Image (cartoon, rainbow, N blue to C red):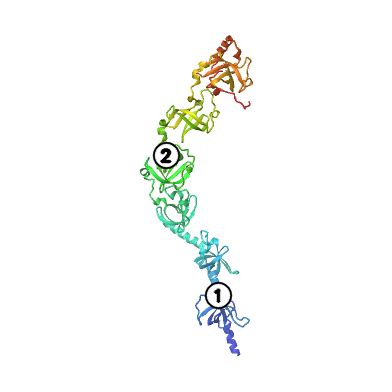
Amino acid sequence: MNQELMTLMENSFKDLREHSIVKGIILDIKPQVVLVDIGYKSEGAIPVSEFEDEDIQIGDEIEVLLQRLENDEGMVVLSKEKAAHKQNWDKIVKVFHDGGLVKGKVKGVVKGGLTVNVGVEAFLPGSQIDIIPPKDLNEYVGNVYEFKIVKVNDERKNVVLSRREVIEAERADQRQRFLETVKIGDRVEGAVKNITDFGVFVDLNGMDGLLHITDMSWGRVNHPTEVVAIGQKVNVIILDVNREKERVSLGMKQLLSNPWEAIEAEYPIGKRVKGKVSKLVAYGAFIELAEGVEGLVHVSELSWVKRIARPSDVLVIGQEMEAVVLGINKEEQKISLGVRQLDGNPWDAIDARFPIGMQIKGKVRNLTAYGAFVEMEEGIDGMVHVSDLSWTRKVNHPSEMLKKGDEVEAVVLEIDKANQRISLGMKQLENDPWSGIDEKFHVGDLVKGTVAKIASFGAFIQLQDDIDGLVHISQISEDHVNRVKDVLKVGQEVEARVIKVDKVERRIGLSVKAANYSEEDLRKETAAFEALRPSTDMVGLEEAFKFAAEEWRPGQTK
């Protein structure tokens, strides 16, 4: 080779720099490699795999990266892929600095996000995929999106993308356009974006509107999920727009006529209606009569006679049932219903089934301080007042004579239909022993009995036929007595003299100290006893315990 040729070749090769992109001509396409001439003294071989998905022909001009002018075999080292990568990288860097967007195809799912091909491989963090965190990243694979480049590392050739920022920017523009044009009363379509306890946020093409739970239905809604689901398309009406705070209030029920406007005509009082149990609460059951219209059956209106503690004991959600309209409050949108009104009230004919004077049998269902409730039939109770338990015993609490579950007999004394009350008496089963008391006990009689109760003013002595007599404290002993229980004990047998018999007041006065008196002494003591007044020391047996300041029973200590 002469000097002139060498000079010519050097001049032609001086523009070929390693790591630069040069143009070349395809000389030959072999099964494994493609031979490319870049105008150098030798051609380069590029693997066929770098031309995948490309339709190439011999003679085509392509751009390649000149990695080395000569390798150990004297061949030029070229790369089609690396040329494209370098070109793409330069474009990515320019777009990043210009703040523009780049299109890319999602390649696959990796830890923390997705890989995207934007000419070079880039990373899309999971938090930057969408406004709403995606549940399944695989649904994005293979799709093409626009991205904002948020980070470029030239040394490591790393690119970080964000699709979320693109969406947010688009939504901001859409939100402004929406706020500029929307007005109250407009009907719009949106998608349910988020659900809370108090309502639903609806996406209106970039603008979030709040559909409050009270504006979802004319009826009662316990939770928004009863009406809508995430992602569901909904038609709503604009109720209010606050452009300064960028807030929009929405309504759904306003698209429908208010069923409560004509509620009084549709459900007049006394009408029999059909519905479905929609909710059970402690105090009653809500019955859905129509869409948006519910009525409440209070637990007390379920039955005339059955004792229903909880509506759930007799009803289930979804159960179809009949009821009667009892009342309507249009302003508060409330309907009162009754189920027991479907049947006749058993109390209407109660006096025919249980006439006054009738003797009945029943179990003691409950005890209170003032009496005992006796079940006459299912749901019908009569009450025996403590004063009607015994002619003779002074009963303070019905538990002294009865216990729950006892089978007892009683007589119907009085019926109050309006208040659904029946008064019973047990003592009326027997004759009043006080009616002939003056025949059994006479002043001066010497009697024996047992101390039944002790009070501060004296002691009650149980005599024959369960009749009590009172020994006043002054009649216990000739000696002064400070406390009755120091001298007498409950259960102690005593002998006493009758010094007073009062049939009207139901009193028998006794004197222990007069048991051995002569007739003269007895007359004096009787006169002294007569002088006592209920307002001072002596009280009638019926009232004795009401005035007792100090009462003592066995087992108590003072």
Q: Nearer the viewer, mark 1 or mark 2?
A: 2
Which SS class for mark 2?
helix
Q: Place residue 34 in its image quadrant.
A: bottom right
Does the rendering let one see residue 448? Answer: yes
Residue farthest along the top direction in this orientation: 520
Relative height, residue 465 to residue 88 (above, below)? above
Residue at mark 1 to residue at mark 2: CA–CA distance:
86 Å
The residue at 39%/51% (across/down) is: 256
The residue tagged 1 is 81
Q: Does the CB distance between marks 1 and 2 fall below 8 Å? A: no
Compared across the picture, whether 494 is left or right of 184 comes to right
The residue at 61%/20% (across/down) is: 493
For the C terminus, the image quarter is: top right
Q: Which residue is more in the foreground, 194 or 453?
A: 453
The residue tagged 2 is 340
Amino acid tagged 2: Arg
Q: Position of residue 236 (x, y in %)?
A: 42, 54
For the N terminus, the image quarter is: bottom right
